[in-house]
Image (tube, grey):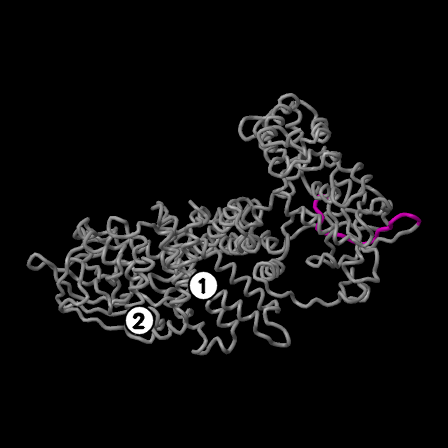
Amino acid sequence: MSEPTEESIRAEVSAWLKANWNPDLDLVQWRSLLADTGWGMPSWPKEWYGKGLPASLASAVQDEFRRIGAIGVARSGVRLLAAGTLLEHGSDALKKKFLRRILTGEDNWCQLFSEPGSGSDLAGAMTRADLKDGKWIINGQKVWTSGAHHAQYGLLLARTDWNVPKHQGLSYFIIEMEKPGVQVQPLRQMNGHATFNQVFFTDAVVPEENLVGSLGEGWKVATTTLMHERRLAADGIITGLPGKGGKQTGKAYEQERTETAKVNELYKWYPQRAGRPDLVIERAKAAGKNNDPVVRQEIAKLLTMNRAAQWTAKRARAAAQLGRVPGPEGSLGKLVGSHVARASAYVHTLINDADAMLTGEDSPMKGLIAEILVSTPAASIAGGTDEIQRNIISERVLGMPKEPVTGLDRPYKDVPKNTVS
Amino acid sequence: MQFSFSDEQEQFRTGLRRFLNEKSPPSEIRRLMATDTGYDRDAWKQLNTSLGLTAVQIPEAYGGQGFGFVELAIVLEEMGRALLCAPYFSTAVLAANAILNAGTEDQKQALLPGIAAGDIVATLAFTEDNGRWDSSGVALTAAEQGGGHRLNGVKSFVLDGHTADLIIVLARSPGSAGDEGLSFFIVDGKAQGLERRLLKSVDQTRKLARLTFDSVPAELLGEAGAAAAPLARTLDQAAVCLANEMVGGAEHMRQSALDYVMMRMQFGRPIASFQAVKHKCADMLVEVELAKSAAYYAAEAAAEEDAELPAIASLAKACASDAFIQTAKETIQLHGGIGFTWDNDTHLWFKRAKSSEVFLGTPVYHRELLMQRWNV
């Protein structure tokens, strides 16, 4: 058989879709078909629900799905991080048990890495896993877990050896969430929303075969998960994006819309977290503050930074498209985004003046402005704090030395750490 | 809009950078900035004969190379990085564009080839003692006399005004105000009644002069009373060019600060290993890269004669001014005591940052213009 080309793949997938895509199918039924034929994850290996295609051809498959508006495999939450990690480190038994139901959307997943005592320093995890009578017994607490309240499974990083240095004593497990000893509590944020959860483990049980990778190699496996998080967009995933325009009718579309709406509801404050600089001019005019010279200066500063940030992102994309060595401009987005958010919150405060003290129905834009003011602090923390971003920029882009790290020369039990209250 | 330079543009930049590194080492900057002239006439001639730099943006019809603002911006960025002491901004940016924007076809044919060849140093005299960066400050008058014009009044903060062979002067008809009655005039640097005095400037690499006009004979450039529009256009283009020159200087500062902290040892380790220093360097990179993005975009907007150019020019000028002065300040800080000495080169760029922050209007002035131009 000859090597597939973009043309041949496009022809093959479009013929297959023509024969099989039917919006009136049940969503799980359709996605099962995708998993079993490999068209759902064409870049995955043939033996595991894929077609073994290179990323470039996989994206051609995605194009064809988009073109006719066919729904892809489930992709919400961290399910694809779980899948990527299992593909790389999981036993065949684990792959067989979980991968298919990840793609069909029957199981939901969550990621149990961060703890109250270890945020930026993820490898400092203190949740413990102790082997007793052939089972792992889990005790401890995780935090900032999105989707934990409707997840059947979690990716758990826990400490299995306290007598070796920090990174060497961690192991990686799959834990069933709907079992005794696992308690999920919504974590209410300062803006009133509860997008994330805290998860408490009290003698929760994990079967021995749910260890992913080798004992003590949890940090390596977790790094894979984190890499997948970054690579996700470029991975050639078939998204469930129905084509734009035109009303998409059919059972599968309705089910997919419900699924998306449920996820989006949790994140509806994210645009406000980014500061909403897009609202500034309109709000300044509405409040009559567009004639205040001081406010004008601050608006100009903010919008200058915002435009420059957009152009910087475009420079990075243009360089990538030309296949050039990535310049520094590609590594700055996260930090710049948090500067924009902070400046934007400041400008919204100046513009709304006394009204900035109010929230809810009585306040500007029915609480939206207030939501900006109390959501922007998250921009400098979530996904790596500004301080961690500056470390990354200075070390990876500028080549500056790391700060000396202490404690890697001794057992983790002897290293100073936070106490869990 | 393009968000990357072409391979040819990158090659042009690389060659230019090598040339300027060789021709403008700190020892040469220090030698020239101490002179009244401020540049070396032979080196200037060589710059233009071997690289054709003053010709870059002048159309081929007038003896130029016919490139656009993107190439001109590359030249300026590299000159800003090298802190080249030469009357380039005055000649190739201010004067050449004023002539292109305002001059008649015959005048362009007469004046631009000399500039393109590097034979003529020229400048634009538009500010006066009041230091205003737009036409509102113009009081110098032009009166018709015997088929020609005579200029009376004072121009100040004129870049290379004391050495220029050719001076484009902004004047108004007696009794006019605002944008009305404004005209450009061509004045010979050696004209009778013109008194030129070098001003003592903080930034010795930027020579500023005060020119007194006592019935100086002048030739009208372009149309009488119609200078407001070409002036505005020239100033927008100049702001874009200055922004690109400034990001070159800012990038040089940022890199020199990084080089220094990587080798400076204190407490038994390079100071580049302290987070207080690393975070400062990361912030400097952010600031310079954002300013570059703005300056590059503005050069594209100028090249494409984008309708948003006036707004973008002000945006880029304000952004690059802030980035340059901030980066230069932090570079002194990261050098510690040595950074405050005359022998250390940092102050040369710091002073250029200071003069560029003000020249053509401060960031505050341009942010206000930006708001007006966006109809806020």
Q: Is residue B375 visible?
A: no
- Residue in view at x 39 percent, y 60 percent: B245
Residue B246 within the magenta-colored segment of the rendering: no
Q: Residue A77: x, y in percent?
A: 68, 41
Count of numbered tags: 2
Q: Residues within 10 Å of mark 1 (few under 14, many from 20)?
A: many
Q: Residue A328: x, y in percent?
A: 53, 56
Mark 2 = which residue?
A: B38
User: In which quarter of the view is residue A254 placed?
Assistant: top right
Q: CA distance from mark 2 to mark 1?
A: 22 Å
Q: Chain of mark 1?
A: B
| Kind of residue at disc 2 | Gly
Q: Are marks 2 and 1 in contact (CB under 8 Å)?
A: no
> Quadrant where the N terminus of chain B lies?
top left
Q: Is residue B373 left or right of residue A199?
A: left
- Residue in view at x 46 percent, y 76 percent: B344
Q: Residue A309: x, y in percent?
A: 50, 52
Q: Residues within 10 Å of mark 2 (few under 14, many from 20)?
A: many
Mark 1 = which residue?
A: B250
Of discs 2 and 1, which sits in the foreground?
2
**Vertical relation: B52 (above or below) A112:** below
**SS category of the residue bearing label 2:** loop
Magenta span covers which residues? A133-147
Q: Is residue A248 visible?
A: yes
**Vertical relation: A94 (above or below) A297:** above
The residue most toward the left is B146
